[in-house]
Image: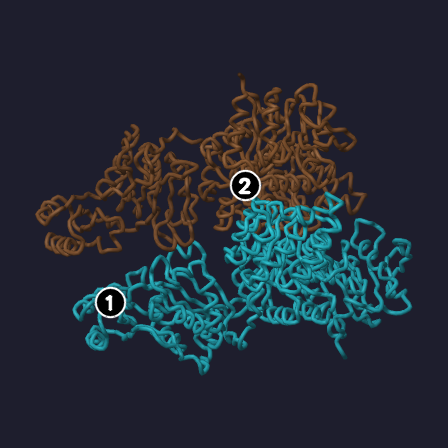
Chain colours: A brown, B cyan
Amino acid sequence: MRTTSLSVFSDPRSVAVVGASADPAKWGHWVARGALRGADRRDVHLVNARGAVIEGTRSVPSLAALGEAPELVVLCAPADTVPDIVDEALDRGVRGFLGITAGIDAVHGPGAELRLAARIRAAGARLIGPNCLGVYDAAHELELAWGTFTPGNLAVVSQSGQLGLEIAGLAAHAGLGISRFVSLGNQVDVTAVDVLDDLLRHDATKAVIVYLESFADGRDLVAAMTRLRESGRPVVVLTVGASEASRLAARSHTGALTSATAVVTAACEAAGAVLVDTPVEAVDLAHLLLGSPFPQGRRVAVVSDSGGQGALASDTLSRHGLVVPRLRAETSGRLSDILPAAAGVGNPVDLAGGGEKDLDTYARVVDILLRSDEVDAVVLSGYFGCYGAETPTLADRELEVIETLGGTVRRHGRPVLVHSMSHDSVAVRAMREKAVPTLHTIDAVARSLGLAADLAVPPRGLGAGPDGPSADLALAAPADYLTGRDRLEAYGVRYPRARAIRTREDVDAAVGALTAPFVLKAGWIEHRTDVGGVVVGLEGTAEVRHAFEDMHGRLGDGGFVLEEMDRRPDVVELIVGARRDPSFGPIVMVGMGGVLAEVYRDVRLGLAPVSDSQARAMLSSLQAFVVLEGWRGRPARDVGAAARVVSAVSRVLAEQPDIAECEINPLRVGVDGAVAVDALVIQLPDCPVGEPADDASTLTGFLP
Amino acid sequence: MRTTSLSVFSDPRSVAVVGASADPAKWGHWVARGALRGADRRDVHLVNARGAVIEGTRSVPSLAALGEAPELVVLCAPADTVPDIVDEALDRGVRGFLGITAGIDAVHGPGAELRLAARIRAAGARLIGPNCLGVYDAAHELELAWGTFTPGNLAVVSQSGQLGLEIAGLAAHAGLGISRFVSLGNQVDVTAVDVLDDLLRHDATKAVIVYLESFADGRDLVAAMTRLRESGRPVVVLTVGASEASRLAARSHTGALTSATAVVTAACEAAGAVLVDTPVEAVDLAHLLLGSPFPQGRRVAVVSDSGGQGALASDTLSRHGLVVPRLRAETSGRLSDILPAAAGVGNPVDLAGGGEKDLDTYARVVDILLRSDEVDAVVLSGYFGCYGAETPTLADRELEVIETLGGTVRRHGRPVLVHSMSHDSVAVRAMREKAVPTLHTIDAVARSLGLAADLAVPPRGLGAGPDGPSADLALAAPADYLTGRDRLEAYGVRYPRARAIRTREDVDAAVGALTAPFVLKAGWIEHRTDVGGVVVGLEGTAEVRHAFEDMHGRLGDGGFVLEEMDRRPDVVELIVGARRDPSFGPIVMVGMGGVLAEVYRDVRLGLAPVSDSQARAMLSSLQAFVVLEGWRGRPARDVGAAARVVSAVSRVLAEQPDIAECEINPLRVGVDGAVAVDALVIQLPDCPVGEPADDASTLTGFLP
């Protein structure tokens, strides 16, 4: 038996709303009303136990009363009746169920929804929801949801129905229409991944906003978002879990764990998707994703008819990680040629009345700026978009200039964004149609442009599929120091030379094999620093003996380690770690070392494995990367070596199923290589050890 | 001769628009049209060289043609004619000039505008502008500006006319009206301070938004904003200069220097004003300032009819520095009593359908939360505000609930903010009227509430008026180390004991007078660390002698200093400095020490002098304050001692006119006091030295 395709939820041949209602405050009313709007395209049946007349259409008392079974059934009926309705519908050959009804488990006991889904799947049918808010598909005039939708090119997929509606409403308010809306509900059958993959075949969809509270199948989701991006449909992701309050709420609401924002950020980077914080950020960004070119970098020219607004635009763009560079003299000269004497021809450009004198000046200035190759985008900020609305004699001229602007954007393949003091004029709508994203605040323009600049980087994908651990992670325990070092050295991470010491008799041989100064470590103790299990700066046999006796006296027998000290000057300390995320699998982390870096939360995560160049990108996006580059006259450190260690650590977790977690703190990065001087490796006792892939030991260039 | 009061710009008995125009694209047309709207209240004359008919009113060819001189003249005429018009008007007794015309200096040469202002002042009259965009006063139906205004309670004062209009337009779009609008222009006579002080007598004004590009009279401005705040009119400040591009633009645009954002932040703190980044931030915040109580702290309860929106609201509030605390079991119990079983009764509160069942649930939940005393504000996020608009049968009920909500706010004196999915419904407008600020995005709600929480602190004022330097700061040069120490020790800053060494003969006596270990410093060299002018860890006479010989050999004769070393454990290093800002006078700065703190820009500024408790507030608002409090099990450091040093350094600059700048880097803060181990004091050579005020040497408790 063939499983039904998801097209039953976007273009069913016939639909029945079970639980349709005449009460305008009830879901069953809204869905029925929406379903009837598609009655030209398909058979629409309303099922209401009392046979009520709804919006002029008489309902039938039950599915049994229908001559032919509908292809899709919308479940709005009370929770206690739903299982029987489903069974009856399956018997009659229904192919799809849209589950609006909530609380089925509460009535029928835990697991009832999953059992329902199993019966539906067994019959080759599919279920969206239950506890969802419905679906909408513009191309097929299918409207089975609360709310009203405007047709357009933006798909909204949401784990929270009402938050999805908020996104759709904000989009409508901003003049953007919806191509498809899917409220996912409890996802007991159809999941976010299924719905995203289905959008690959949806011509009307040009961009996607997805809201998720949990990422049960994180890697599948990344793959699905990557496919959408590669099909030309950028994905904007919204999630929760940045605060303790929302983590607790999500857990009690859906029973699922949210993922840390930094992990979701890493997942979006892998997929070439953009993570935003709020619905309006997603919608503002969508203006730029629907037709406009993306910026290929962060350099922006600002043009305004007001010195104040130009300066404020520059500040706001800078706050969003964009750069407003000085223009070359040649470009400023070209601007001078067409602008009044009082104009500012640096960046920001101040038209100083040149726009009013001739509106075409706006288009000419933009063309000069884009032609200069000095900027990746132009932002117009101010009155443009208001001329025609406030002075009707200028209306036609303004539209002509907008036509020219649209041509300039197409010709140069670079975005022009407009912050217009008009919220919604004919000119504003014309600009949006010409792929000139136009927003009402400079905040929205700057934020959207900053986010879109992230999309200049193509999806990096996920690399080789990682192996998960084959035993319970709770059984994992720290390896002793030398074992930990060995596991990491197998991947090319370099450590100072070291020797094991178990008794005082081992001291002389160890000292003889190494070069002073030394550090003595109690290698079997995880938090050895806290218990006096580390002594640094030992210079010779006598000092080492004395330190060993003292430490052994205090800490007892164990695997001591004598290690050479890395005393290179101008070293910057990093922390590099990796762990297994419950949703996204192995994750690698890098950050600056030390207490302050922890306070300022300056760390970057990546889905493991990451390549050397991906690791380098992680490093360079640290706020404190300037320190590695050579801050205040200090020399540049060996960033390449640091990146190779980050990549190596990521592969350790991706390839070694017995390692639950590992951390190097600190990794000392000098001008000539990176040396690890600690190794915390948490491993499972009874788990196969993987083989490092062939390229694992290619790290070079450490201690001089 | 009495100088005219500024009321001539808000309620003139008569007005003449000189340069009125029939062309709707010209300023002279807009101003004429606006002026005529007040013709019921005052005589309005239009002056147009060709005697044109404008909006049905015949103009006169010149001021001379008017029988009686108008009280106020609006200057829209070409720049070349303005000086003659002014002279004629002054002769006829005109009391006020509103200078719209731009470019007077460009036509008549540099200084022409200042000379014009001098003539006007000499005649006892006043001038706003020139190069301004006009004024509007709702109470007196005076409309002499481009644009259209809605009457209300928000005053807008702007150095950039168009940016001021953007603010007014955003306010109108958000349902907020304007009480007075003043475009300041070039401020050659009437300044921002004058206009702000005039608002003290303006009953219609309940809050003020001011945009300034420069702060020539920074301390006067702080005093004026403080007076407004104390009169119950909170001030929102907008400025530019956060990016290099905007600093350059402002300089070329107005010739003025912008102030660093951190300095303006400090000025706003002193005035009890709020600094925002963009126009829409100012307008969103104004909703809260016009009638709603301010939050007295940062604890917020979130209520939503959607689990997703509640979680997202919690995250967004957290990003804006607010706290969404867990509720006590007792409060959760009270919520459980009135909510469905599926509801979330933690924080966020998830109504789970309880709102639809009975809309009054919204008001009852808010009342329970405010009555609990566990939160300083409540945020409703979601569908509330849409019920009546989408389901007309619920409209009356929704308005009743809003009435109840308004009463709850008044009774508890704490704010309730609503994020409503409706942009502008009857219910939304009703909430705004009931002092329940209602905004369309959770972003705007969270940001506004976070900013308003800053207003819980009353203005701290400026302390004693600081003395400025009496000589050119460019002549200032670094004092030698011991002199610098002395200047700071006079204010109670503690240093380790030290002795001067000029020759090798001084070494023994110095060593004898101090306790090892020592540090030897080349005290006359400013950047001594860079040239090997600091040697630490010296243990006895021999080591000191050797170090002295070596340093003397390399650096030559000079004022060497032998100093005891502060070797206390668990010390946190701070940097404390003070300098003279061209606009705001003496400024004190504190931040974490070290390279990373510099990268993360974690510093706080204050207008000097600051008291001990103000200094403590500066310290506690450092992001890395947690490190001083005892991070990761480390002990709490002596924050009080650190604060006393910050206060002392602030008083050094406020009271010592010869000191241009000083810096302690580092200040070592331990569990038992703060010890300075460096002193950079930049002083003027020929300038009187001030007396420390009496309380200067009260710092206690340093080295054990």
What residue is shown at x 56% (from left), y 25% (from top)?
A: A126
Q: Is residue B628 visible from the viewing direction of this image?
A: yes
What residue is shown at x 58% (from left), y 67% (from top)?
A: B272
Q: Is B607 rendered above or below residue B79?
A: below
> x, y percentage for residue A584?
43, 36
Residue B590 found in image quarter: bottom left
Q: Which residue is under mark 1? A: B552
For this view, does B439 lie left or right of residue B700? right
Name the one closer to the observer, A35 or A287: A35
Q: Amino acid at mark 1?
A: His
> x, y percentage for residue A516?
16, 50
Residue A406 found in image quarter: top right
Mark seen at residue B703: none
User: Disc 1 and disc 2: Cα gap in Å?
Assistant: 64 Å
- What is the chain letter for disc 2? A
In the rendered image, residues at marks 1 and 2 fall on the same chain = no
The quarter of the rendered structure image containing the N terminus of chain B is bottom right
> x, y percentage for residue B623?
45, 58
Which is in the foreground here, disc 1 or disc 2? Answer: 2
- What is the chain letter for disc 1? B
The quarter of the rendered structure image containing the C terminus of chain B is bottom left
Q: Amino acid at mark 2?
A: Leu
Q: Residues within 10 Å of mark 2 (few under 14, many from 20)?
A: many
Q: Is residue A308 visible from the viewing direction of this image?
A: no
Q: Residues within 10 Å of mark 1 (few under 14, many from 20)?
A: some
Count the marks: 2
Q: Please, what secondary structure does the residue beneath circle 2 have?
A: strand
Q: Residue furthest bottom?
A: B694
Q: Please, what secondary structure does the residue beneath circle 1 have?
A: helix
Q: Is B191 rendered above or below residue B343?
A: below
Mark seen at residue A238: 2
Name the one closer to the observer, A303 or B664: B664
